[in-house]
Amino acid sequence: MKITLGWLPFVVLETIALVSAFTWELTASALGPVLWRAQLYLLMPGSILVGRFIEKFLWNTGLSLRTRGMMELIGSIAVNAIIWLLLLQIVRGLRRLCALTNR
């Protein structure tokens, strides 16, 4: 699968967020809070929406905290991908519009 230039920053940022989400608890050094903040901010738009959904619909269903956490992490990345796609479409549309007006 080819990753275009528009998707490369998304893949890099979400990879950093994913690694930070899994490793921030494992370190007792000052790196732990930095990793926690990194995953918090990089997963932010998706984690707010998915977190609300999980809290409202899946909280008392008997799912373990680990399962809900994994669902929130995967859902956050999916929502962030949709937001990134919309932003890419807006930027591409504006670039086409500017190219047409400069002719």
Image: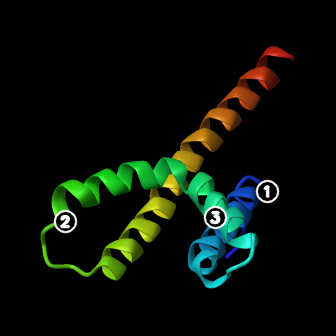
x and y, in percent, of residue 100 in the image: 77, 21
Residue type beneath disc 1:
Leu
Which of the 4 image quadrants contains residue 70?
bottom left
The answer to whether 52 appears left or right of 90 in the picture is: left
Left-right relation of 50 to 83: left
Farthest residue to the right: give it: 103
**Amino acid type, residue under disc 2 in the picture:** Leu
- For marks 1 and 3, give the one nearer the viewer: 3
Q: Mark 2 or 3, which is nearer the eye?
A: 2
Q: Looking at the picture, how far across and down is residue 79, in whole percent?
A: 45, 55
User: Label 2: which residue?
Assistant: 58
Give the residue drawn at x 13%, y 73%. 61
Q: Write down the residue under mark 1.
A: 5
Secondary structure under badge 3?
A: helix
The label shown at residue 14 is 3
Pointer 2 or 3: first along the chain: 3
What crowding class fits label 3: few (fewer than 14 Cα within 10 Å), some (14-19), or many (20 or more)? some
Secondary structure, mark 2, is helix
Distance between mark 2 and mark 3 Cα atoms = 24 Å
Q: Residue at x 61, y 52 (%)?
A: 41
Image-based side of 1 in relation to 48, left or right: right
Q: Residue at x 53, y 50 (%)?
A: 44
